Image (tube, rainbow, N blue to C red):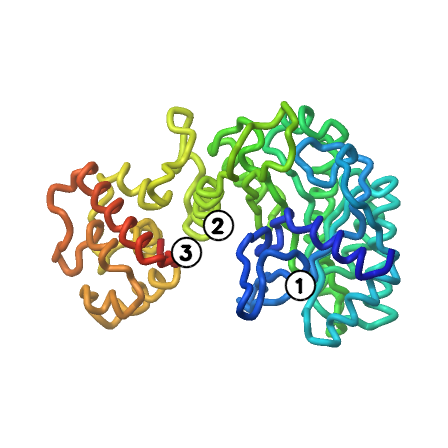
């Protein structure tokens, strides 16, 4: 099989991995430019907000594992292909020279063994970085069960590494992916956390010389949502623990795509995308809005409301904290107001040092007034519903949401 044939198979096999953002779209564009339905090139965002195009591909879809939820599992009858390290390195560098891509997202099925797969991936990185002097962004996956020495070697040549945890509990992992176990996933995650921290501590000791980099963009992971019966509370608690104990940059949530008729899997007609979206919004609240998982959900209410975003839902369940006076409220209180995002909260704190904040000024600072007005006062003025009745407010926000849906507008994540 030639390189183009392998690329078609292995780019398509990689499209279900969401941990580098855009993928899996079925949108087609027969008359214009661009087609999101094909795998291969995806987009990711760097820490400074730049969007980069990545070649998203597997090294091999020939896998010795038989995970029930995976389209590349051993028991599936589908075309198989494996690159050589030189083939993949040449393909990447040629795409880069033609300005098709700015980087590489590289994963793989478990080809022969975890260590053999990691050695092949490492050889590809060495060719790219040393032979072809490729300096672009590279995101690679760690194969669970591989030797820590290989993880160490990887970290010197890749920008971001991820170890996919896949399922929220060990029980589900045992049921659907019996050849994986919790320890084989957490061990490299712990090792990466330790090595990244050590590298950061080592930098000052280099005294002016350029310290070697080790996974400078940090590590991430991916969770499949809806393939197993765990509720949102379980998923969010797991994410909270991963952020606090392993210092992860991102947890990606992937709505389960029914690609198998395995009796252990739920019979879904469509992936639970709304649920996936609510988890992403809640994840944002954990990382940037200083919420705790226990504030958003509990055992009596373990699932998110699919009709309201988690921040508005929390505010309606905690109306005793509102309205807050924007001229006096702390930064943490402002962050909890629906319609006030991280940027607008910071702007309010700065602006009120020299101004009395009014609704007009709030609007100029980026606050979504039509949502925030129910939860704030400006210099004592309140524009919301004076009854502060939860049911009335809920109906109001659902009506607003239906307007957005009818106009096809997407909410800005930081302002939700």
Residue 109, by quadrant, is top right
Residue that label 3 marks: 413
| Numbered tag placed on residue 287 in the rendering | 2
Residue 66 vertical placement versus 207 (above, below) = above
How many C-alpha atoms fall within 10 Å of the one at disc 2: few (<14), some, or many (≥20)?
some
* Residue lying at 63% horizontally and 57% vertically, measured from the top left: 38
Front position in the image: 164 or 227: 227
- C-alpha span from label 2 to label 1: 25 Å
Q: Which mark sits nearer the N-terminus, 2 or 3?
A: 2
Residue 197 vertical placement versus 366 (above, below) = above
- C-alpha span from label 2 to label 3: 13 Å
Residue 402 vertical placement versus 349 (above, below) = above
Front position in the image: 195 or 115: 115
**Where's residue 147, x and y in %?**
84, 43
**Where's residue 195, x and y in %?**
73, 51
Q: Which mark sits nearer the N-terminus, 2 or 1?
A: 1
- Does the image show residue 377? yes
Residue that label 1 marks: 54
């Amino acid at each position: 099989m030639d390189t183009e044939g392998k690329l078609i198979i292995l780019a398509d096999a990689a499209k279900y991995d969401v941990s580098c953002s855009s993928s899996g779209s079925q949108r087609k564009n027969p008359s214009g430019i661009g087609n999101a339905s094909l795998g291969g090139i995806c987009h990711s965002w760097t820490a400074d907000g730049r969007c980069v195009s990545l070649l998203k591909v597997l090294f091999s879809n020939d896998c010795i594992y038989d995970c029930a939820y995976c389209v590349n599992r051993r028991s599936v009858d589908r075309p198989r292909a494996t690159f050589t390290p030189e083939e993949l390195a040449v393909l990447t560098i040629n795409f880069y020279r033609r300005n098709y891509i700015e980087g590489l997202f590289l994963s793989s099925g478990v080809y022969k063994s975890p260590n053999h797969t990691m050695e092949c991936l490492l050889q590809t990185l060495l060719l790219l970085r040393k032979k072809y002097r490729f300096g672009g962004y590279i995101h690679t996956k760690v194969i669970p069960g591989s030797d820590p020495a290989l993880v160490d070697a990887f970290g010197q040549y890749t920008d971001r590494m991820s170890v996919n945890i896949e399922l929220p509990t060990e029980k589900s992992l045992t049921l659907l992916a019996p050849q994986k176990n919790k320890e084989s996933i957490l061990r490299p995650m712990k090792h990466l956390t330790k090595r990244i921290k050590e590298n950061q501590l080592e930098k000052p000791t280099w005294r002016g010389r350029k310290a070697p980099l080790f996974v400078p963009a940090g590590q991430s992971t991916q969770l499949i949502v809806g393939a197993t019966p765990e509720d949102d509370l379980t998923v969010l608690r797991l994410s909270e623990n991963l952020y606090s104990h392993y210092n992860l940059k991102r947890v990606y949530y992937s709505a389960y795509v029914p690609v198998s008729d395995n009796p252990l899997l739920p019979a879904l007609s469509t992936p639970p995308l709304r649920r996936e979206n609510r988890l992403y919004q809640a994840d944002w609240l954990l990382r940037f809005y200083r919420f705790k998982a226990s504030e958003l959900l509990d055992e009596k209410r373990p699932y998110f409301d699919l009709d309201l975003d988690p921040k508005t839902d929390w505010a309606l369940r905690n109306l005793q904290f509102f309205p807050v006076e924007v001229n006096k409220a702390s930064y943490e209180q402002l962050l909890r107001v629906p319609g006030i995002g991280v940027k607008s909260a910071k702007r309010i704190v700065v602006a009120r040092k020299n101004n009395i904040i009014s609704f007009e000024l709030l609007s100029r600072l980026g606050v979504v007034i039509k949502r925030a007005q129910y939860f704030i006062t400006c210099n004592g003025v309140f524009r919301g519903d004076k009854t502060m009745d939860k049911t009335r407010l809920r109906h109001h926000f659902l009506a607003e949401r239906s307007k957005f849906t009818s106009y096809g507008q997407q909410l800005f994540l930081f302002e939700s």
